[in-house]
Amino acid sequence: MPKPKTISNFKQQHRPESGFFASWLANKKVFAIIALVFLLLILVPLAKNYNRKRIVEKEIADIQQEIAEFEAKNRDLKEMVDYLQSDQSLEEQARLNMGMKKPGETVAVIQGDAFGTVMVEAARPASLPNWQKWWQYFVN
């Protein structure tokens, strides 16, 4: 008859070997260091991805701002084109550049200095040394 296995015999037969690796994992400090290394291996790529995401979001915001500026400029140019294609603009350009007039109007052309503008040149003082210029500036 076979010998019955007791619990103590079972524990003795299936006891894990206490080798080098098992003793390292049993040490709390070593286990904490290994866990920290794995944590760093996970967090470093996450931090890089977060940084890339932030850079891309900033570029998107800058490009959207440029788009808004271009759209505003485009609206202004469309308004200018609409005005230049209007009859009012055509009439204004004909009056200013070609001297045209409506029936019943009289055109008066004013030439050069008809307003009596006289250009007066200030008399320049003789070339004085710099210290005399400063003296005149503060005293006079």
Image (cartoon, rainbow, N blue to C red):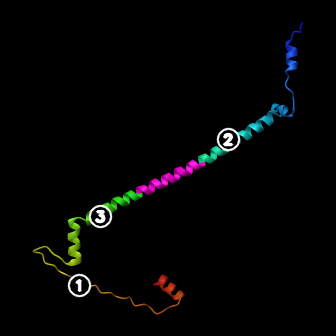
* Quarter of the C terminus within the rendering: bottom left
Name the side, left or right, on which 128 lies relative to 75. right
- Part of the protein shown in magenta: 51-68
C-alpha span from label 2 to label 3: 58 Å
Label 1 with label 2: CB-CB less than 8 Å: no
| Residue furthest to the top | 1
Q: Secondary structure at mark 3?
A: helix
Foreground residue among 137 and 129: 129
Label 3 with label 1: CB-CB less than 8 Å: no
Residue at point 72%, 39% (across, down):
38
Q: Position of residue 52 (x, y in %)?
A: 58, 49
As for residue 77 lying within the magenta part, the answer is: no
Q: Secondary structure at mark 1?
A: loop
First reached walking from the N terminus: tag 2 or tag 3: 2
Is residue 1 shown above or below 40? above
First reached walking from the N terminus: tag 1 or tag 2: 2
Residue at point 51%, 84% (across, down):
134
Q: Residues within 10 Å of mark 2 (few under 14, many from 20)?
A: few
Residue 70 is drawn in which quadrant?
bottom left
Look at label 3 and name its amino acid.
Val
Residue 114 is drawn in which quadrant?
bottom left
Label 2 with label 3: CB-CB less than 8 Å: no
- The residue where tag 3 is placed is 81
* Quarter of the N terminus within the rendering: top right
Name the side, left or right, on which 121 lies relative to 6. left
Mark 1 or mark 2, whichever is nearer to me: 2
- The residue where tag 1 is placed is 111
Residue at point 17%, 80% (across, down):
108
